[in-house]
Image (cartoon, grey):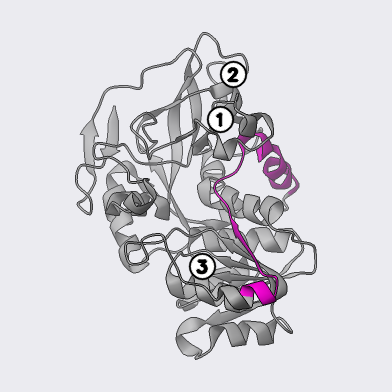
Amino acid sequence: MKAAVLREYGEPLEIEDVSDPRLAEHGLVVETEACGICRSDWHAWQGHGEWADDRVPKGQILGHEPAGRVVAVGDSVDRFREGDRVAVPFNLGRGDCDHCRNGRGNVCEDGLALGFEADAPGAFAERVHVPYADYNAVELPDGVSPVEMAGLGCRFATAYHGLAHRADLTPGDWVAVHGCGGVGLSAVHVADALGANVVAVDLDDEKLTKARELGADETVNAGRVADVPGRVRSATDGGANVSVDALGVAETCRNSVACLRKRGQHLQLGLTTDEERGEVSLPTDAMTMNEVTFLGSRGMPPTRYGELLRMLDRGTVSPAALVTNEVGLDDVPDRLAAMSDYGTVGIEVVTEF
């Protein structure tokens, strides 16, 4: 089968013929019909993450936002049959640790990260293997397209989990979103759907226009404002209740913390680059005095995808609205390269394999 393989960090992915996935008795093989291209793939391609013991090995098939059709079923799988349409969370749990049993499989003690580890080859490929499928795979409702579900992948699910499960967000709160790439725009859309008021911050007017379309009430072009946190505090009548760093650079992280009101919550969704190497200095004394909370969010527990699917069915959220481009597998190297200077808008999805 064809797949996009990481051979050298920073060099274009190689489109190669590789062996088909090997079916485990607890797994599924899924024919990939759509797979989102995420900034986390860009981080992997760049070789980031060694500072957190999270560097993707060379030889890895990338891609971690797939949806498709089941073509092979392991002997011990009960919930799925050939022909079923499924989506695959990137944070794969075994289903049997304390975290998994308590609905937190996204941080499974023995979990795998699809597309980021040698034991979990990714979905920039014609077919992908899903381990522990009864726990991890998510059945697609009738009427939900693979492109919609790929749009609901890592970025949208991470934003939803962060805002709905990690942050104490209530309707009417103000949410600031710093960085309007795929995960940032997802956070804008999710926050609006949850009844919040939203301020979107970015350097790109096109992305800010998209944020308005997805529910932002106010926008701030950070390149035209001397004091971004001050502008956000002004727009929110004293500061955001929840503020999201959706990019992962030191400036957006600190701006996010600084724009909060007392007892506000900072939500970290973006991963850092080799400039920060996983560490950002923060005003800890001010955070202590103002009782500011710093939260992290990683993916979403597979057991909670039903919440998002019900919202999708009711039309409360529309991941398809974030999809701006459908491309082929051969285009993946160029589309990853475009992320180096933030040359993409919304979510791009591979639909031709």
Residue at left offset 67%, top offset 57%:
163
Which amino acid is tagged 1? Val
Q: Where is residue 351 in the image (x, y as percent from the top left)?
A: 41, 42
Q: How crowded is mark 3: few (under 14 residues within 10 Å), some or many (20 or more)?
A: many
- Spot the residue most to the right: 171
| In the foreground, 243 or 80 | 243
Q: Which residue lies furthest to the bottom in this view?
A: 226
In this image, 121 relative to 261: left or right? left
Q: How far apart in space, not on screen, are marks 3 and 2 (Cα)? A: 36 Å
What separation in Å lies between label 1 and label 2 (alpha carbons)? 9 Å
Q: Where's residue 184, x and y in %? A: 54, 63
Mark 3, secondary structure of its residue: loop
Q: How many labels does the image show?
A: 3
Q: Can residue 137 be seen in this view?
A: no
| Residue 180 image label | 3
Is 288 magenta? The answer is yes
User: Is there CB contact under 8 Å for labels 1 and 2?
Assistant: yes
- Segment colored magenta: 287-314
Element at badge 2?
loop
Q: In terms of image quadrants, where is residue 137?
A: top right
Quadrant location of the C terminus in the rendered image: top left
Q: Residue at image x 24%, y 40%?
A: 58
Residue highlighted by disc 1: 86
Which amino acid is tagged 3?
Cys
> What distance separates the C-alpha of mark 3 from that of mark 1?
28 Å
Question: In terms of sequence position, does the residue under pointer 1 or pointer 2 come before the other?
Answer: 2
Which residue position is annotated with label 2?
80
Is 10 above or below relative to 248? above
